[in-house]
Structures are given as structure tokens and as C-alpha cells.
Amino acid sequence: MLEVAPVNPLRTGLPQEGITTPCSAVFFGASGDLFKRMLLPALYSMHLQGMLPAAFALVGFSRTAFTDDTFRDYCRKQLDLFMPQDRKPQGPLWDDFAKRISYVTGDFTDKAHFVALKDRLAQNDTEFGTAGNHLFYLATPPPVFPEIIKRLKEAGLDKDPKGWTRVVVEKPFGTDLESARKLQQTIEAVFPENEIYRIDHYLGKEPVQDIIALRFANTIFEPIWNRNYVQNIQITSAESLGVEERGGYYDSAGALRDMIQNHVINLLALVAMEAPISSHADDIRNEKYKVLSAIRPPSHGDVWSISARGQYGAGTIDGAPVIGYRQEHDVAPDSNTETFAAVKLMVESWRWAGVPFYLRSGKRLPRKVSEIAVTFKPIPHRFYGEATDKIDPNVLVIKIEPDEGISMRFEAKVPGPKEHIRSVFMDFSYGTGFGVVSPPAYERLIGDAIQGDQTLFTRWDAVERAWEIVTPVLEVWQHTKDFTFPNYAAGSQGPHSAQQLFPDWRRI
Amino acid sequence: MSFGLVLQQLDESARERGGGVYVATMTIVVFFEDAAIGALARDRIHTLAAKHPSRVILFDATQTEGTHHVEGDDWIELGAKGSNAETLRGAANALRLAEAPVILLWIAPGIGDDERFCELSRDARTVVYNSSLVDAGNAALRQLVEYVKRHPELPLADIAYLRLAPWQESVAILFDGEESPELLDLTRVEIACGSDPEGLYLLGWLASRLNWKPGSAETLTGPDGKAIAFAIRRQGEPRRIARVALTSTHSTFVAEVDPHGEMINLSVTGGHAKPPRLRAINNPGVAALVERAILSSQNDRVFQASLAAAGGILASGTPSR
């Protein structure tokens, strides 16, 4: 049984400046790209802001041979590369951070190396007061997740009598429904759900969190947030980039697995869920799961009528020629992998009956844009006679990337004696509205994991349901070679089949 | 004061800006009567208004009443030398945004008998004061304590208190976990700081959290009747804490700023000795402190209790300076 720490009366009512929970954070895959580009800079930035707990230690774990000292040097070099000019690692603050860094060279299949890790964590508890609280962050390629989980158990690292243990699992959570269930079985055999933090860094972005504020901190939207007023909802996550260095991974994944199954469906859940009874993690996650449960996965026979796929060929992005997908490094020259995916989903609930949700994601589209567009129904009465047909519907756009904000389209009369109606746009941008850059998603998510707040992490039931929704599409696509690939030029709006699925996509 | 011309200029600026979107979160009303302070205030309010788009009404008591200056469609400066309380309130009400809350920044010494402060604060959602602005002594804090006693409903935030956040956090860290029982065993508190209000607030905060009552000019009394000696001495830059030391029967807990003013060194020596720790100090600028006041402080009960406790300590004999 855990000993409960005495309450510190000085904390009562004190606005929390930083995280107070002591913690040793272990990063598996510490020599990898994710750690050096995203996680380490996030941790150091938190340290500079005084956000990390005073009792904190960082342990790197990977196959690459480092000593504690050479790993500290490695971390410093990466921070020199990836931190902004005014926040480079230097001086006593870096020294204080560096002394909390240690490293275990280890094979993910070798129990002995996990025993060494256990010794290191015990040492941290003594040296840095980390109180037996251990955060294990799986920043490795997904295939080694099960090995790590099993070794943690074998080494007795699945629990500590003095503190808590949490495991952060990076996406993708499985490559299909079956593998996700298998991974879940492996993890849940060792860790209960309240110790598992499935990370989707999209959910740490400020505008994604603002969806909840927009819907539930205002009274004007919720009454019209339903089938009576909404015509359709489009969720877009588009990139102008190709697969870059990730050809090997991407060719076995594709746009549906890489983006729709996780990021995009998570956005759908936030937009479509009912009002949670509170802002507590499980109240929100209950509603997310309920709305995903209301989406009936398509039958295999329906797949072609509710989906479109594409693969980019050579084209032009920002005026520069770019190669096609099949010419990318580590991509099969006859690849059948989709780089564009679009699906139409129906939420079969009282609120959303009959309202289509159009989801799309793709690479090598004209620009990077992530947004949710809620298109409202036309006005019900032909007030302007034939001119009524020219009146555009109202559209509310929640902009996630690259601009963060909210935009509303509505109709207004052009000044003058005639009844000319035209669309005007009301824009709220976080950049100008609050004049501040949103904090990086990883800082928020790492902080939440240390503090035990699971709100922005995906619960297993939602992950499983998202896989169930996309699985029929995946299966049909996998078993049907698309001889039209490549079927859209880099820099275009996507394949023609997407326009057939839904002609009114917003322009990217 | 006549506002017709001011309003006309605002309208013209809005038309020049074009049909874009207008975002505003509040009306900031600022009062100052010292040119140097006014220059600093302008700079900081610009920073604040860049983050939280606002209409700004600056009452500049170094300029004659009737003069005005308008920048863009949201920045208004009005001469307020010799203006009486009703005139100022009338101007603020005429020029404020109708739907947005009013935040009053009073950047002037003395509020005790100042009708202008009293009138302007009546319409404010948050009143931001700075009891260590004008000098390092405790006269402004004494006035504030007295004013709040007479106007307990004042939605007040004091920059001098808000500035303590890194120190409150650092002192709290020293007593997290198994060290917290030591708080009941404290026998002495020493605070070194560059001006009195911060030191008194920090001591007041400790007293309010630990249920210490004023004893004499140099002691507080714990809930068990035990005396806790205290000393506040001047050291370092004005408006900055330099060192806090809390002594218990077994140990001494110290939070101390490093020579560069960038970090707070945390140490515990004696029976419960611990390895030293460091914390980035992150002294927030005034604009950030005002933002904090606006976002979170109007119902801050810990602040209210700390102010009341600081008032009690002052009343028990701490000399005026």
C-alpha cells in the first residue's frame, strides 16, 4: 500500500508555478529522432521555465553505447541544435539539468539491462529524491513496445512500493485492429489503464484543447451544434511535405493508419461528443468513446462509396518540382500505399443523425493545413427570391495548423441601394488575438503525464473503436491494387475520387 | 473634458484600419502622475495589450487636463493634471468599451485619501496596485491595508505580492513530502529583501498558511503558543527577495538567489539535510504580473489572507520606514 505524503500547507491555494510531483523519467529510444528533436527540447524548456519538479531525474535507455557523461554531451549537442538561440544549454541551469541526466546502454530484450535500470532508478530516488515515481516513455519504434513492457515486468519495474509507475506509449498504437489488441493485451497484463498514457501529440495542441472551450465555455454554439442546423462537418489534415526520411515506415502505413485512425478521428470525437459532466479526464474520455461508438463501421461492400484514396505523383509545390511517391527513398516502385485518404462517416446519434462527417488527410497537397469546418444549413426561407440560391451557408472553421484560431463566415448586405448579399469572414487568430505563441504540445503532455492527468491521452476503448471504424476500409484497400496510382499530382487538391465522394471540400 | 474629438479620432482610425476583425478583451485604465513612471507604464501596457488586445485609457497627471493624444483606434492618453475624481470616472466611462471589463492600474503613491482612486476603482473588475513602486519602505502597504479594511470588496491585486510567486513556490518545495511536519516546528524566519512590501507579504503569507498570529515587533505566535522569531532586513535590489531562511529545531531551510539573479538555490542543512537544488527564478516582468492579476487574482483568498496577516505584523510594532 502506498504511503500518503503529508499535506504541505504552503501549497494550499498557491497558484502552481511548476510541477511538484517528484519523478524519474526514463526515455526508451533515447538516441532516436523523437527524443532529440521533440522530447529533450521540451524537457529542457520546461526546466528553464521552472516547470519540472525540483526532484527530477532523466534516464536515457537505448542500444547505442553511451556513458552518463557522453550521453550528457550528446544531449547538450542536440539542445544546441534544436533549442532557439536564446535558450541554448549553458551556465548553471544547464549544469543543474545535466547532473540529473544518466544513461543505461541496453538491449530491449535483455532483462539484465532492465535490472541495471532498476538500480539506476533506486539511485535517483536517493540522490534526487524522486520518491519511487517512475515515468517510462516508449519513444522507440512500435515493434519493440511489447519487449520493453515485458522486461519492465520481469525486472520488477512495473510497480514501486514507494511511488507510482506510468508508461507513455507513442503512436501508432498497433498497425491494425488485431495488432492493437495484442499490444493492449501485453500492456494491460503489466499496467492498469490508469497507468497507461497513449500519446497523440495532436491533442496537446492549443487549438485542439480550445475545441472544448469553444463548445462548452460558450452558450451560443451548443444550441445549433446538431442535425437541425449543421449540414456537414469536414476535418482536414493536409501536408505539403512528402514522406521525407520516413519512406520505409510510411510505405507500410499509409495515410489512413498514419493520420485518420488517430489524429483525425480524435478531432471528430471532440467536435461531435456530448457535453461531459465535468472537465475531469474520464468524463471527457467517456464522451469521446460514446460518440465513436455511435459511428457504425462500414461494411466491406460500402467501402468504395464512403472512401477515396490517392497517391501523389510528381508535381509542383511552392513553384518547385517534386518527385512522385514511388520515387521516394525506401518506397516500393510499385507501391499500393495511399498518401491521401478520405472517408465519410455517419454518427448515428440523436444529435448527429443524417449529418455526414468528411475526413481527409494527405501528403503533397498544396499547403499544410489542419482544420475543422462546420458548415451550417442554408437559410430555410427564400427571403431574397432567386438570389437566395446564391447565399452561401455559414461556416465555422476551427483552425489548428499552421494558423491557430477560429473563423466564421456569414452573410452581409453590400452598402448601397440594391440588395446585394455577400460573404464576410470574421477571424480570430491566437497569434493576434492573444499575441502569444502556443506552448509546444510535448511540454504540455509530458507535464500532464508527470502529474497524472490523462485528459489529453487516448483511452484504450477509444483507440480500439477507432481501429474498428477504419478496419473495413483498410482491409478493402489492402486487398485491392489501385492501378490508377499515382492518381494526383503533387501540389493538386488530391485525387478526383475525393471530389466524387464529396464535391464541396474546402479548398486546401 | 470633452470627448467628442477623441471619439471622432478613434472612429477615423477604425475606418483607416479597414473592415478587418476587431478583437478586444478589456479596457485598461491607467493613472500615473510621474513622467518617468509613465514612460515605463506605456512600454509595459503596450506589451500587455499586444497579447490581450485592449482599449487603453491613460490618465497622465503630468499633462494638463484637456490635452489628449490618440494612437490607432484603441490607445487614448488624456491629460489629468488637476482633474477631479468625477471627471476621471466620467472620462473612463465615456471611452471604455461597453462590453469589456475594466482593469484599473493605479501607478501612483498613496490611495488612502485619494478620491480619484476611489472613484475609478468603482467600475473596475480588477484593481492592480503596486505597494513597492515608489519607495522601498512600508508606507504604501500600510495605506493599502487600511484602505482594504474600509473597502473589503475591492477586487485588488498587488504587484508586490504577485512578484513573490517564484519564492512562494521555492519555499513550498523545501517542505514538500516528508519535510512538511517541519513547518510545525519552525522557530525562526529571516527574510532579506530589497524593499519592505515583498518581505512583509512573504512573512504574511507564511503566517496565514501556518496560522501564526502577531506577537511582538519581532515574534509571531504559533497555534500551539510557541514563539516564532522573525527578521526582515534590507539586502539586494528593490522589489526583489534575496534570501529566505526558516529554522526548525532540527534543520535550516534556505532559498537564496544566486549572484546573477537567475536561479534560486534551495538547501536544507542540519538533521534533515538534503542535496542542494536549483530552480530557474523566472522573475516575471510587470506586464506578465499584471496579466496574472487580470487572469487569476481578483478572488485570491491566499493574497487576501497574506495582506491581512502582513497588516497584523505591521500593526504589532514593525516600524514605519
Image (cartoon, coloured by chain):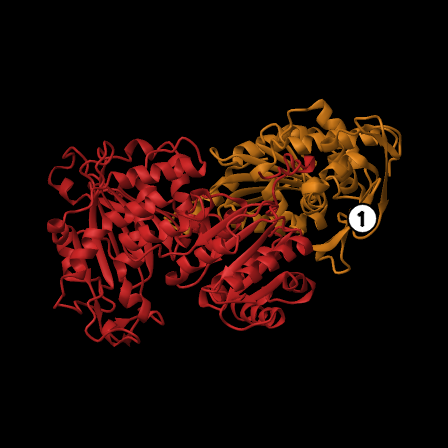
Chain colours: A red, B orange
The one nearer the camera, B90 or A94, is: A94
Given the image, what chain letter belongs to the residue carrying mark 1? B
Residue, x 14% and y 65% (percent of image)? A481
The total number of labels drawn is 1
Which residue was labeled with disc 1? B194
Mark 1: amino acid = Gly
In the rendered structure, the answer to whether residue A388 lies left or right of residue B18 reads left
Judge whether residue A440 can be spotted in this image.
Answer: no
At which x and y percent is residue A462? 33, 44
The one nearer the camera, A297 or B313, is: A297
Query: Does A398 sit above or below residue A12?
Result: below
At which x and y percent is residue B51? 52, 49
Judge whether residue A111 can be spotted in this image.
Answer: yes
Residue, x 25% and y 46% (percent of image)? A423
The one nearer the camera, B304 or A278, is: A278
**Mark 1, other Cα within 10 Å: few <14 / some 14–19 / many ≥20:** many
Query: In which image quadrant can residue B124 be found?
Result: top right
In the rendered structure, the answer to whether residue A459 lies left or right of residue B316 reads left
- Quadrant where the N terminus of chain A sits is top right
At which x and y percent is residue A491? 25, 67
The one nearer the camera, A313 or B79, is: A313
Residue, x 53% and y 53% (percent of image)? A157
